[in-house]
Amino acid sequence: MRIIGGKFKGRRFNPPADGWPTRPTMDHAKEALFNILNNQIDFEASKVLDLFGGTGSHSYEFISRGCEDVTYVDKFPGAVRFVRKTAQELGIEPFLKIFQMDVFRFMEFSKEQYDYIFAGPPYTLPTIDTIPDKIFEKDLLLPDGMFVMEHNPHHDFLNHPHLVDVRNYGKTIFSFFK
């Protein structure tokens, strides 16, 4: 895995694979997503929330591009340890708030609002279809903000009232909500 753009462009990171319940976004899909975001987001001025953060790949991309306010949430201890270690190696700890907890619990209690929210939940998560509604019910997104959810073809949000775009990269789909 690698960081696609910004000051850490090309930097590789290799999370341990054994026993990890994470499914990192493939580099080609992540690169396509960030090509879209480059034209829509002011990275340096954005407050970002990375839900089901896994390896921290999306968090690193935002910080690499100048974002100084990223919140990462994942409940898997191994992933959180890896992200803390990688943040230290990159020297980005001041820009990254790390929460080891269940994403739904975090959404329930968070009082913050964000310019950009990314969710990369496990594709088999039984409550995956409730995530967009929770984001809007809990008012986590700023009025001009954007929420992107990664999912597979088994999930369809075409009738969601906040859906504005869908991009398909094989088995990886990004649904964009505003």
Image (spheres, rainbow, N blue to C red):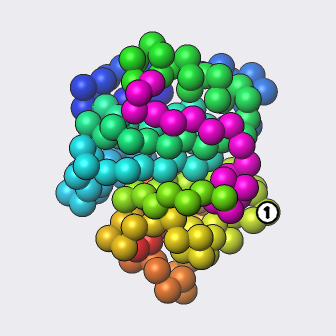
Asked whether residue 156 appears in the rendered view, the answer is: no
Measured along the vertical axis of the image, is residue 11 above or below residue 150?
above
Q: Quick check: 5 left or right of 96?
A: left
Q: Is residue 31 above or below residue 109?
A: above
Tell me residue 104's x, y (percent): 71, 58
Residue 96 in sight from this viewpoint: yes
Residue 101 counted in the magenta span: yes
Count neighbours of disc 1 (C-alpha within 10 A) and say few if under 14, some if 14 to 19, many if 20 or more. Answer: few
Residue range in magenta is 93-108
Q: Residue at x 32, y 70 (%)?
A: 144
- Residue 172 higher or lower than 140, as above or below: above
Q: Is residue 135 left or right of residue 45?
A: right
In this rendering, would 106 be left or right of 14? Answer: right
The amino acid type, in three-letter code, at marker 1 is Pro
Q: Which residue is the site of mark 1?
A: 126
- 7 or 32: nearer the eye? 7
- Element under disc 1: loop
Name the residue: 79% across, 63% down: 126
Which of the 4 image quadrants contains residue 94? top left
Residue most extreme to the front = 111
Return the residue nearer the eye: 46 or 52: 46
Task: Place residue 147 in its image quadrant.
Answer: bottom left
Q: Is residue 25 magenta?
A: no
